[in-house]
Amino acid sequence: MSTDMNARTTGGPAQGPDDVPDRVRALRARVKEFVVDLVEPAEPVLHEGGPEADVLMGRLQRQAREAGLWAIGHPEHLGGGGLPFLDYVHVNEVQGRSEFGQVALGTFTLQDSLMLDRYASEEWREKYLRPIVEAEFWPSFAMTEPGIAGSDPTRLRTSAVVDGDAWVINGRKWFTTGAQHARYTTVMVRTETDAPVHESFSLIIVPTDDPGYRIVRDTPVLGMASDHCEVAYEDLRVPLANTLGPRGAGFRIAQERLGPGRIFHAMRWLGQAQRAFDLMCHRLNQREAHGSRLADKQLMQQHVFDSWTEIQSARLMTLAAARRMDAGDQARVEIGALKVAGARVLHDVVDRALQVYGAEGLTDDTPLSRMYRAARLARFYDGPDEVHIQSVATRLLRGYDAGREWDFGDR
Ligand SMILES: Cc1cc2nc3c(=O)[nH]c(=O)nc-3n(C[C@H](O)[C@H](O)[C@H](O)COP(=O)(O)OP(=O)(O)OC[C@H]3O[C@@H](n4cnc5c(N)ncnc54)[C@H](O)[C@@H]3O)c2cc1C
């Protein structure tokens, strides 16, 4: 709902904890304008890929820099805009309207930048950190493997053994997003043989131009070219100094990376859902059938009601989780719940918008067809629904077992 509408219905804008804070309102509006005016119209070319798309993306990135909108969520000491986490969450929402928003605005490297900033050695900070903030090249993160359940990473088989002052890595990963563009990858490998399972894995930085790193194939998903690649690691040698953080800390660091990452995902999904909602409402007001506007038909109004309610619920849930994280809490229950709820809302809202559009929604004449397929992916990456459902329910039930009821009002 726009500020104008708030003002009309409540007699004036009220600033609650879940509203866009005044201090970030203008910036959020500028990012939204950038995405709506420049990035969304570029989507058909960007989806095609190839040299024309690269040139266009380069131009968008230049425009983002010139507009002072580049990497605004990255810390200032890394060359970013230094926007505090809770403010960035609001900007991320509108940036997410387009799946290309993050790349155009230089924020797609945020999770990896924070991880390198915290754990990389001086050499790797120098070599990779500034260039990824500048989007000179892409990072990638390789955990999932073919042939085993990615939702249970204790089963990962790719291993690294010490040979002199080097790691020798062997194994195979897949669904490594961005692998074709990446200059390096952070790979999760088994390094310890006699430690407890959650301390048996380490993260190692691997340059992708090493002869032991071979992209086997790019795997299209739901018919879309994807840059999610299968990669073979064949006697790949890297210095021991390429270990990110301490040996055996792979799970802990990966978890740290994923926590805020899920908030960022969820806010971008809300941006996509809002875009689908906008399209749905405009279409309903414009289209006529059987003697009246589609907007006047109650079955269509149900789509509007359900979508509004779901978007707003997921939004409040996500902002509440972000506030808890900002206060230093890991917010595991909230993060798990919003990962599932956010992906579902995105899927369902886009699905309704498709229905409202009729057959046209299935074509590439509207962005909905791609948004629909992309929404389906959200229920897998960063953990499939069921894993989060199980983890949230287990935590809640464990609390009750220990005599602690979950007081929604007290949290
Ligand atoms: C678009 C996309 C991008 C990705 N990018 C990356 C990336 O950059 N790097 C990377 O390492 N990985 C990436 N992944 C992989 C992703 O993390 C895995 O797909 C995910 O962890 C699930 O693993 P899996 O596909 O092997 O499914 P499996 O583990 O085989 O699970 C299959 C199904 O079993 C069910 N299931 C699993 N566990 C449970 C449970 N405990 N209870 C009930 N049911 C359960 C779920 O329905 C699940 O979908 C990406 C995936 C996608 C789709």
Image (cartoon, rainbow, N blue to C red):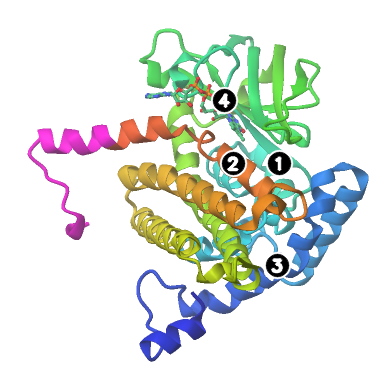
Cβ(mark 4) to ligand 1 < 8 Å? yes
Residue 167 can be seen, yes or no: no
* Image-based side of 106 in relation to 292, left or right: right
Q: Secondary structure at mark 4?
A: loop
Q: Nearer the viewer, mark 1 or mark 3?
A: 3
Q: Earlier in the sequence, mark 1 or mark 4?
A: 1
Residue that mark 1 sits on: 128
Residue placed at 49% from the left, 18% from the top?
Answer: 149
Q: Amino acid at mark 4?
A: Met
Asked if labels 3 and 1 touch by Cβ distance under 8 angstroms, the answer is no
Q: Earlier in the sequence, mark 2 or mark 3?
A: 3
Q: Earlier in the sequence, mark 1 or mark 3?
A: 3
Q: Amino acid at mark 2?
A: Leu
Q: Main secondary structure of the magenta part?
A: helix
Asked if labels 2 and 1 touch by Cβ distance under 8 angstroms, the answer is yes
Residue that mark 3 sits on: 36
Residue that mark 4 sits on: 143
x%, y% of residue 177? 67, 34
Q: Amino acid at mark 3?
A: Val
Residue placed at 54% from the left, 40% from the top?
Answer: 378
Residue that mark 2 sits on: 116
x%, y% of residue 366? 73, 56
Separation of residues labelled 2 and 3 (CA atoms): 32 Å
Q: Nearer the viewer, mark 1 or mark 4?
A: 4
Q: Nearer the viewer, mark 4 or mark 3?
A: 3
Q: Secondary structure at mark 3?
A: helix
Q: Compared to 24, does 61 lie above or below? A: above
Label 3: few (<14), some (14–19) or many (≥20) C-alpha neighbours in 10 Å:
some
Q: Amino acid at mark 1?
A: Tyr
Asked if labels 2 and 4 touch by Cβ distance under 8 angstroms, the answer is no
